[in-house]
Amino acid sequence: MEKIKRTERLVAITQFLMDQANQLIPLTILADRFGAAKSTISEDLVVLKEIFISTGQGGLETVYGAAGGVRYVPGISLGDAEEFLANLALRLSTKDRILPGGFLYMTDLLSSPTLLRSLGLIFAGAFRVRKPDVVVTIETKGIPLALATAEALGVPMVVVRHGNKVTEGPSVVINYLSGSSQRIQTMSLSRRSLAGRQRGVIIDDFLKAGGTVRGITNLMTEFGVEVVGMGVLMEASLDQGPKLVDKYLALLRLTELDYLSGKTTVTPNHLGLIANGGIE
Amino acid sequence: MEKIKRTERLVAITQFLMDQANQLIPLTILADRFGAAKSTISEDLVVLKEIFISTGQGGLETVYGAAGGVRYVPGISLGDAEEFLANLALRLSTKDRILPGGFLYMTDLLSSPTLLRSLGLIFAGAFRVRKPDVVVTIETKGIPLALATAEALGVPMVVVRHGNKVTEGPSVVINYLSGSSQRIQTMSLSRRSLAGRQRGVIIDDFLKAGGTVRGITNLMTEFGVEVVGMGVLMEASLDQGPKLVDKYLALLRLTELDYLSGKTTVTPNHLGLIANGGIE
């Protein structure tokens, strides 16, 4: 790209950095790509940083030194996040979403990239301070949510499989007690999938008794991965018995589920609690 | 946000539109949010459109009329796409990626949000002209790729399940012949998951004989969904027999797989072929 005017360059840099969100881009790359001196790019980045602070929707992180550069960290403002969750709760508080076993039909919402993006940004906002280097989930329904969170955090995602999949090479297999059905089940994870990862955030769509999330936690111990956060889209607050996990962040809460009328009530949890969402 | 200078507004609008990629944003929303007249916003959008044309990495689409607005359509330039696939092919042409059954271990790459984003943009670039309104895949390994494609296209994703999941409500179940193992298998999809969808793109990670993709195609027929494109990350060109599907877009090709030495060779397909990638 030939030398361009400042406004155009600022917009083009914004697009370039957002396209490669969470990746550290050396200033020389920007200087080459946009035909400007490194000092000019530095000044541009100062301007952009200010603008992003005023929008509150993400920001620039500068890393100094020889291996330095700049990265765009995507974000969502607290106001937008709360409005989003309130709307989502309303959309879930409708008729005919009850599934056998006391689950809620959410697949339609969990297949929308737009909704997933916002959910990922909210989870990332809660867990970024704990510096996770991987997001872990279990197949199948948790995957889109986990991927959106991993994307917002800029770390890879790992998917635990049900049963023991021989096609993934040597695996670690554990048995766990499903909290709600009280059945012994099996989950497995390929040995090589977590090589070099040390701090994991567990993400799942629904938390009932917590047996599955607890199983994943035990599996992480086998890999030497410390669980630094757990997030679920929705918790059921209807069950009697205690949960099998205690420190987790649920964005929504299922407070009413009337089989007879088909009516459900979902309420958003307060995002002020987000700071307490991880593991101490 | 109070009234701000033009450069800052252009950057903030870019961030706002990219944050809500593929969504149609009415001009009044932008005018309210950025404290400017609609005519001013219109002029801003003309400037932004020009800049994005020059970067080649995505663009603005304007819809006129009362229900109109503007949407940011993410994209990747042909040059960046080809460079990306060449690098990916190199990373896959290494030792010790062979899995039982002649598959290739790609899970590490398919769990990186950065790689997935580029792959989604490449598939979206190939299939957008066919105006799909849903991306369809089958659990488990195709999901991240399908979600990235759905995100780039701005449409929802639907996940076909193996076997028959009773917890998803009334479902359509079909049997299909797995092309490589020659076994009868079952796949199912909840009736409500495709309500109102008519044009689908099928995305999967690996195509060997094509039995699974063919099964999904048959399932789509039951839902009245026309398959307007099929994309796979990699095809195996090693099998003897003919493929069970003929019109599909494979980004990479597995051309050599030596069990003895553990060596594999993967080559990128030419993106010039992309225009022929869909179904006629």
Image (cartoon, coloured by chain):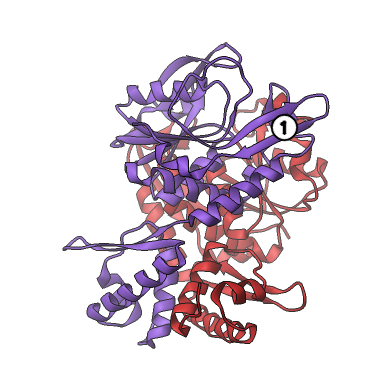
Chain colours: A red, B purple
Tell me, yes or no, if residue A132 can be seen here: yes
Residue B68 picture location, percent across and down: 22, 62
Of the pair A108 and B160, the residue shown nearer to us? B160
The residue under the point 58% across, 24% down is B208
Q: Is residue B16 left or right of residue A224?
A: left
Tell me, yes or no, if residue A110 can be seen here: no
Of the pair B195 and B241, the residue shown nearer to us? B241
Callout 1: 10 Å neighbours few (<14), some, many (20+)?
A: many
Q: Is residue A143 left or right of residue A111?
A: right
User: Mark 1 falls on what kind of element?
Assistant: strand
Of the pair A194 and A35, the residue shown nearer to us? A35
**Residue B2 to residue B279: above or below:** below
The amino acid pointed to by label 1 is Ser
Q: Which residue, given by chain and number where applicable, does mark 1 sit on?
A: A188
Residue B229 picture location, percent across and down: 40, 35
Q: Residue furthest top?
A: B183
Of the pair A90 and A145, the residue shown nearer to us? A145
Host chain of mark 1: A
Residue B120 picture location, percent across and down: 50, 47
Q: Is residue A178 left or right of residue B7?
A: right
Tell me the quadrant of the picture where the C terminus of chain A can be found: bottom right
Residue A69 picture location, percent across and down: 68, 74
The residue under the point 52% across, 62% down is A19
Q: Is residue A129 left or right of residue B152?
A: right
